[in-house]
Amino acid sequence: MQNFVFHNPTKVIFGTNTISKIGKEIEKFGLKKVLLLAGGGSIKKNGVYDQVVASLKENHIEWIEFWGVRPNPVLSHANEGIRIVRENNIEGILAVGGGSVIDEAKCIAAGFYLDNLWQAFEREVEIEKALPIFTVLTISATCSEMDPYAVLTNEIENKKWNIGGFALYPKVSIIDPSIQFTLPWEQTVYGAIDALSHIMEFYFQAKGEEPTSSIDEALILNIFRSIDTLQKNPKDYYARASLSWSAVLALNGISGSGLYGGDWACHTIEHGISAIHPEVAHGAGLAVVFPAWIKYIHTLNEPQFLRWARNIFGKENVESAVLSLKEKYRSWGAPVSLRDLNISKQEIPLIAETVWKVSKIRTIGAIKELDYNDIYEILNIAY
């Protein structure tokens, strides 16, 4: 096990009827005016917006609303948010939504202090400070509510890249699992697959380290049980709460402690897919990429992949476990091939080239540093 430092400064308030606490939490930081960032309007249908606004009013917090964050947030919208923040003397960002909204909130918070936000994605400038970020989570998936990372698409250059920095940890995040009762089934599933993928990015790079590998296995199995239960009863609070907290633990530092930083090739490949096809949900893309990547890469860390096959699926070889993973995803209604995403085989070279652009700023993969040909082969397996 590697040496590591675990430090997560985000305060999480978890449970039913907790959204009303957000105004008081913002007030504790001495803020008087925030940007309320949101997506397409679902928070006005499920009652979250009314609870947030009531809490802000009660604690004498002014706000300006900025709507329209896309499921795959884009640079132009984030830049518009930065302009609004600067012109209105806004002191902090309140993200009300899922991971995409929170990611864009982080970009706006960091971009306030930068001349050019995209330079941070190109690794030309460091993120040293950001406006304080607060979140009210509506979809459990990315753990952006308790991590220091954000993903954004430069829609002009077809680059879906990430940034990170300690300043991007939210100050306070509210997680009320009960507000997710009415989520469309596919959003619940794709959120779970995203969380599973975060765990596996760390887990497969491990060399049998305990206790982190055992924690990761428990989280994987817990997410499986939660989704299987929610498929029968979307309003099962215990399953919703279990999924919500598992998604947090998947990427708040717990699941990767001492495990070499993770591989992250699958996330990078998926970002290439959804950069070209923004209609593809992140979790849907990961459901397609991960089984193909496991099939391609598993012999390079065979003991850990065999451990996964046995402890998760009760299989004695990785190939059978990959089939079981695909069957599980398929049973939830998730895609398991590029064909399922309506992506043609002719597009594979373009997707591979889009993924390969990331090599300009960092390596792709850790178990194996992937080159263009590796990416191309994985995409072909995924087809």
Image (cartoon, rainbow, N blue to C red):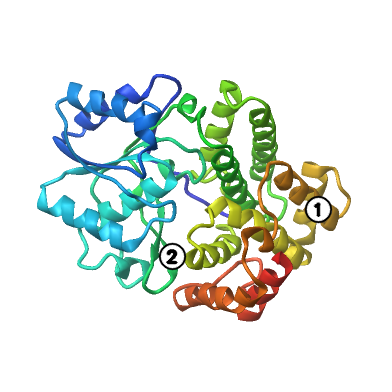
Label placed on residue 323: 1
Image quarter for residue 192?
top right
The spot of residue 214 in percent (x, y) is 69, 40
Indicate the amino acid at tag 2: Trp
Picture quarter with the C terminus: bottom right
Is disc 2 surrounded by few (<14), some (14 to 19) or many (20+) residues within 10 Å?
Answer: many
- Indicate left or right for 79 with 304 as reference: left
Label placed on residue 260: none
> Foreground: 321 or 57?
57
- Is residue 102 visible to us here? yes
Instruction: Give the structural element (helix, strand or loop) at label 2.
Output: strand
Indicate the amino acid at tag 1: Leu
Residue name at image x 64 percent, y 70 percent: 344
- Is residue 371 visible to us here? no
Label placed on residue 161: 2
- Indicate left or right for 219 with 132 as reference: right
In this view, 38 is above or below 118: above
The spot of residue 347 in percent (x, y) is 60, 75
> Foreground: 277 or 35?
277
Is disc 1 surrounded by few (<14), some (14 to 19) or many (20+) residues within 10 Å?
Answer: some
Pick whichever of labels 2 and 1 is earlier in the sequence.
2
The spot of residue 302 in percent (x, y) is 79, 60
Instruction: Give the structural element (helix, strand or loop) at label 1.
Output: helix
